[in-house]
Amino acid sequence: YEANLTVIGEFDTVEEFCRYFNWLKPPSNLERNSNYHLFKSGIKPMWEDEANANGGKWVLTMKNQPQLLDRAWSWLAMGLVGEELDEADEICGAVVSLRSKVDRIQLWIRSKDDVERVNSIGRKLIKLLDISDTDGVGLEFQVSI
């Protein structure tokens, strides 16, 4: 898995992030079974990474909603870079995955143990992405395996 990851770039400022983000294809234009990963420096997008080992992830699912997928990923990426979601350095990164049945956006967090903090991050995620049940979006929290 790790051998198939390609680093597109690293950044320290919003401006540097935008230089990369603005030339990427929107997630809906990726080939099926493709992912974008946006993780903090030094954290790999895998459960075996020490930062993720005791954590979990908020998973949004949607089917055949390319505009919503692109908007949600863009807003999440900007929110992460702008540090709008992070509570006490809990956020490790995010993933958007294009799949044949259901597309997913995942927000990986460092610790699953503080239920109040996990739920607070989930509420902030919903607010940031401006989504609701009526959008046909599923949302659940999954713990690392």
Image (cartoon, rainbow, N blue to C red):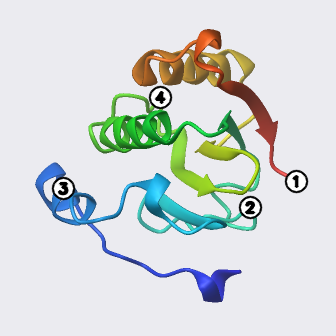
Residue bearing mark 1: 145
The residue most toward the front is: 64
CA separation in Å, label 3 and label 2: 27 Å
- Does 123 sit left or right of 49 as displayed? left
**C-alpha distance separating marks 1 and 2:** 7 Å
Q: Which residue is mark 3?
A: 18
| C-alpha gap between disc 1 and disc 4 | 23 Å
Distance in Å between CA atoms under marks 2 and 4: 20 Å
Question: Which amino acid, by three-letter code, is at mark 2?
Answer: Trp
Could you say which disc has been placed on residue 47 in the image?
A: 2
Q: In this rendering, which labeled residue sits more in front, label 3 or label 2?
A: 3
Report crowding for label 2: few under 14, some 14 to 19, many 20 or more residues within 10 A (C-alpha).
Answer: some
Residue found 51% across the figure and 24% down from its top: 125
94 in relation to 67, above or below: below
Crowding around mark 4 (Cα neighbors within 10 Å: few <14, some 14 to 19, many 20+) is: few
**The residue tagged with tag 4: helix, strand or loop?**
loop
**SS class, disc 2:** loop
Which label sits in the foreground, 1 or 3?
3
- The amino acid type, in three-letter code, at marker 3 is Cys
